[in-house]
Image: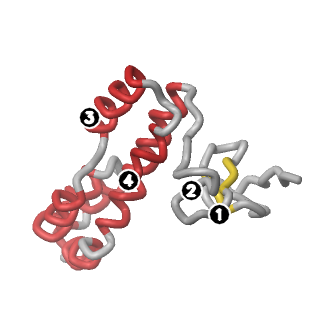
Amino acid sequence: MLDLYYTANMNDQQRAFFYQEYARMKKDEVVGVLFALLLGCFGIHKFYMGETGWGILYIVFSWTGIPALLGLIECFFMPGRVRRYNDGVAQAIAMGMGVAPGGYGAGGFAGGGRRDPCAACGRMNDAGAVFCPGCGGAMAQMA
């Protein structure tokens, strides 16, 4: 469903490119959970999500057992983190193509309410938001 939001205003060629890039760059929730559960003591799930610094820190402290405990806890949060990562990937691809995200009709986003992009980071936020929760930048107020 997420990709439908980003591909609503694309032609067939743009949509094909978007799906190809999205399939190449997205992460799998199950793989993330398994990495955190089985190899969390070495921070493999951090490397999988592109957090190399945290992954190295997990490896350095793997002898303490603390990263193993953290990996066990993080496996429950991994699906949400992977979904946010994939949303960012889809948004980056669409913005890189110069195509404004569409929507699911006149109401805008799936929730039905209007959503406005942040001028600084491009994240879609609820209409009327004063600050962007993604980057903390001030939102332009629409009349």
Q: Amino acid at mark 2?
A: Phe
84 displayed left or right of 33? right
Q: Nearer the viewer, residue 44 or 115?
A: 115
Does the residue at mark 3 contact the one at mark 1 (Cβ under 8 Å)?
no
Residue under label 1: 113
How far from the left and from the top, in percent, is residue 24? 26, 34
Q: Nearer the viewer, mark 3 or mark 1?
A: 1
Q: Earlier in the sequence, mark 4 or mark 1?
A: 4
- What's the residue at 45%, 25% (across, down)? 11
Residue under numbered circle 2: 109
Mark seen at residue 88: none
Task: Mark 2 or mark 3: name the one nearer the start of the chain.
Answer: 3
Between the C-alphas of marks 2 and 3, the distance is 25 Å
Q: Secondary structure at mark 4?
A: loop
Q: Along the horizontal axis of the image, is 129 left or right of 87? A: right
- Tell me the crowding category of disc 1: few under 14, some 14 to 19, or many 20 or more residues within 10 angstroms, Cα based: few
State the separation of the CA atoms marked 3 and 1: 31 Å
Kind of residue sitting beneath label 4: Met
Quick one: SS at disc 2? loop
